Amino acid sequence: MALKLYTTENNSRAYKTLIAAAYNGIEIEIAPVEMGKTNKTPEYLALNPNGKIPTLQTPEGGIWESNAIARYVARLADK
């Protein structure tokens, strides 16, 4: 399963994840979120019970909070 980042367009908090991914050669699919709709679906809330963005979908489950996501992506280069 590929990594999928749920975010809105031009979300400054998502940029740090995208920069870490580009720097380490990791592909991340962008999944657009419409606040108030997409982030309130049961599928999204299963990934992030807070319903906030950005959220990264990984094979292990969802990761939220932009610093945690960026750190996860940066550490993938070590694997």
Image (cartoon, rainbow, N blue to C red):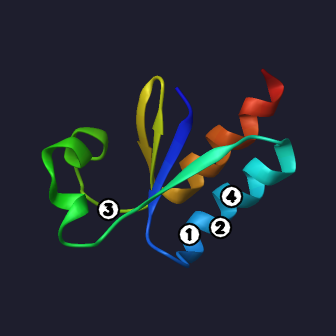
Residue 14: where, in percent of width, then height?
A: 57, 64
Cα separation between marks 4 and 2: 5 Å
Task: Evaluate if marks 4 and 2 touch, with contact meaning CB atoms under 8 Å apart.
Answer: yes
10 Å crowding of disc 3: few (<14), some (14-19), many (20+): some
Q: Quadrant of the C terminus?
A: top right
Q: Counting residues from the N terminus, which is met first, the one under dot 1 or under dot 4?
A: 1
Name the element at disc 3: loop
Kind of residue at disc 1: Arg
Kind of residue at disc 3: Lys
The residue wearing badge 2 is 15
Residue 55: where, in percent of width, then height?
A: 43, 51
Q: Residue at point 45% right, 64% down?
A: 7
The residue wearing badge 4 is 18
Cα separation between marks 2 and 1: 6 Å
Q: Residue at point 84% right, 43% down?
A: 24
Task: Evaluate if marks 2 and 1 touch, with contact meaning CB atoms under 8 Å apart.
Answer: yes
Q: Residue 13: give its label.
A: 1
Q: Counting residues from the N terminus, which is met first, the one under dot 4 or under dot 3?
A: 4
The residue wearing badge 3 is 52
